[in-house]
């Protein structure tokens, strides 16, 4: 099947999966008495820049009307990127095509009848041919962790996928097809795991040998069971297993002796972050992986100090996590904790904050009213700035010409030298100048969050040396790519 048929011609093709590249709209379809399916299509033409010498063209969008009167009304680009004030102009095309799909004694076929010449050049294809899709799938299967941008650009050792097929110059198409391949890989892996599990439950391991009976003492089978077996045989246990009595805060928490040592010697704040979408287990739909990291001055990088698979996301689950983490620091009492603790930085999760407060009150037997929580616990300011950028990007929230003004005025709120009265005055001014701002700003300046985000509102200064979770997010990405 030709990608760019042109002129009056008629031909038959046995390769039915190759896609045409002309921008066409279906104007009618019907089925013949012999079962063959017929499609009638017309070309939509193209949009071009009217400036002399400019070669910018854009593919038309398919109109809602599906008849012989269908006309392209818009394209993917409203204005020429080389001439931002010039609107693209439509160039109509009178070419038409009839496609008949059927089968005979040899197999399936596609018969094409093309009428007329196209009044424009070859359009950019939006669908790759079947051979190109197979090559693309091989590239993704070889290295599934590559980003769509890395696939398109390539490297010194990897050919860019845009060389495989012109359709893969579009990063959105690359992202879509990569997602399909990754999903197929996940399904294959899941089937393999289910097959191994069925063999194991049937009395055979992956090698066909008779498997040992599983215990019934709360220790898990599979890879986690292997870890548990190592712990049971070790003089230095490193795994705290789930206890059946902890149904409301169950989880698996892993901490090695070097982790505890680095935690005790750390001179910088700890960072805690959850790895979203990493845990896939039907038994625990709310399960999540949580990792704590701190900076190691010897290794010159952030290293994990506690890794947990929590079976839920409640404050009780995070309370157990923080209690194990703080216990490893070996504080004598609350006074020792207040003098020597280096700080904790988390995202703006309410469950994490309540879990940290519960852990402190349970460990040191102090009332929450006696603790100035923002002295030890801070919200990540980078998360706040990301939220501001997301709000600012929407033109209905912040007009285009005022975006830089809004950005600078919001960042002034993070100034630790700002007086409390000036802070609230700036907030009031922002709400007046940007009518869509109050709801977003009120959420961040509520009593539950404000003191942990904005230093000028804290009753006592934060003990940590920084207020972001960049190190832990980098560690989380490293963990994800490793698996």
Image: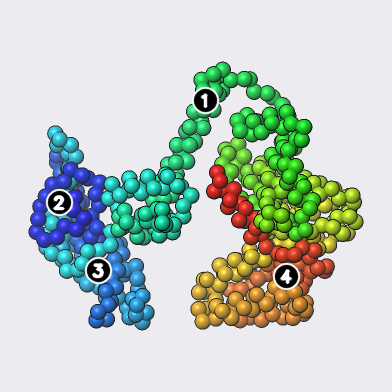
Reading the chain from its start, which is encountered first: label 2 or label 4?
2
Q: Give the mark toward the camera: 2 or 4.
A: 4
Q: State yes or no: discs 3 and 1 in contact (Cβ < 8 Å).
A: no
Q: State yes or no: discs 1 and 2 in contact (Cβ < 8 Å).
A: no
**Which percent across, then down, holds residue 280?**
56, 41
Reading the chain from its start, which is encountered first: label 1 or label 2?
2
Reading the chain from its start, which is encountered first: label 3 or label 4?
3
Quadrant in the rendering for residue 37 = top left
Q: State yes or no: discs 3 and 2 in contact (Cβ < 8 Å).
A: no
Up-down: is 63 above or below 113?
Answer: below
Disc 2 is placed on an element classified as strand
Quadrant in the rendering for residue 91 = bottom left
Label at residue 46 = 3
Q: Residue at x 51, y 20 (%)?
A: 208
Label at residue 112 = 2
Q: State yes or no: discs 3 and 4 in contact (Cβ < 8 Å).
A: no
Reading the chain from its start, which is encountered first: label 3 or label 2?
3
Label at residue 454 = 4
**Residue marked by disc 1:** 206
Up-down: is 337 above or below 384?
Answer: above
**Which percent across, then down, holds residue 126?**
31, 58
Q: Residue at x 76, y 46 (%)?
A: 260
Marks 3 and 1, how far apart at CA: 58 Å
Q: Is residue 152 rendered to the left or right of residue 351?
A: left
**Which percent across, then down, holds residue 89?**
27, 76
Reading the chain from its start, which is encountered first: label 4 or label 1?
1
Marks 3 and 4, how far apart at CA: 53 Å
């Amino acid at each position: 099947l030709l990608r760019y048929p042109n002129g009056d011609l008629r031909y038959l093709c046995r390769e039915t999966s190759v896609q045409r590249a002309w921008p066409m709209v279906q104007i009618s379809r019907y089925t013949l008495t012999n079962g063959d399916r017929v499609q009638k299509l017309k070309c939509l033409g193209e949009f071009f820049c009217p400036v002399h010498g400019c070669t910018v063209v854009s593919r038309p969008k398919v109109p809602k009307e599906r008849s012989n009167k269908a006309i392209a009304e818009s394209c993917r680009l409203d204005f020429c990127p080389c001439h931002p004030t010039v609107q693209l102009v439509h160039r109509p095309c009178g070419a038409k095509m009839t496609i008949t799909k059927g089968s005979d004694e040899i197999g399936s076929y596609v018969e094409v009848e093309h009428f007329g010449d196209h009044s424009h050049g070859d359009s950019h294809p939006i669908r790759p041919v079947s051979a190109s899709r197979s090559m693309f799938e091989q590239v993704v299967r070889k290295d599934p962790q590559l980003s769509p941008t890395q696939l398109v650009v390539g490297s010194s050792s990897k050919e860019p996928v845009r060389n495989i097929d012109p359709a893969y110059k579009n990063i959105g198409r690359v992202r879509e097809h990569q997602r399909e391949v990754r999903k197929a890989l996940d399904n294959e892996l899941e089937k393999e795991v289910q097959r191994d599990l069925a063999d194991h439950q049937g009395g055979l391991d992956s090698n066909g040998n008779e498997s040992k009976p599983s215990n019934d003492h709360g220790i898990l089978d599979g890879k986690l069971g292997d870890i548990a077996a190592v712990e049971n045989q070790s003089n230095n246990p490193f795994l705290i297993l789930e206890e059946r009595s902890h149904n409301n805060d169950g989880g698996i928490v892993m901490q090695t002796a070097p982790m505890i040592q680095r935690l005790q010697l750390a001179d910088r704040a700890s960072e805690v972050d959850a790895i979203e979408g990493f845990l896939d287990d039907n038994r625990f739909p709310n399960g999540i992986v949580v990792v704590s990291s701190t900076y190691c001055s010897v290794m010159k990088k952030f290293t994990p100090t506690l890794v947990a698979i929590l079976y839920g996301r409640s404050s009780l689950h995070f309370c157990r996590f923080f209690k194990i983490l703080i216990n490893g620091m070996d504080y004598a009492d609350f006074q020792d904790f207040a003098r020597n603790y280096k700080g904790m930085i988390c995202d703006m999760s309410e469950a994490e904050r309540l879990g940290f407060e519960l852990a402190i009150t349970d460990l040191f037997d102090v009332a929450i009213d006696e603790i100035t929580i923002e002295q030890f616990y801070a919200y990540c300011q980078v998360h706040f700035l990301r939220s501001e950028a997301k709000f600012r990007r929407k033109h209905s929230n912040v007009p285009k010409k005022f975006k830089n003004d809004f950005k600078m005025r919001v960042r002034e709120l993070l100034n630790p030298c700002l007086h409390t009265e000036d802070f609230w005055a700036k907030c009031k001014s922002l709400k007046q100048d940007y009518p869509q701002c109050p709801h977003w700003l009120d959420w961040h300046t509520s009593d539950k969050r404000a003191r942990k985000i904005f230093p000028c509102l804290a009753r006592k200064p934060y003990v940590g040396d920084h207020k972001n979770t960049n190190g832990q997010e980098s560690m989380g990405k490293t963990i994800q790519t490793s698996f």
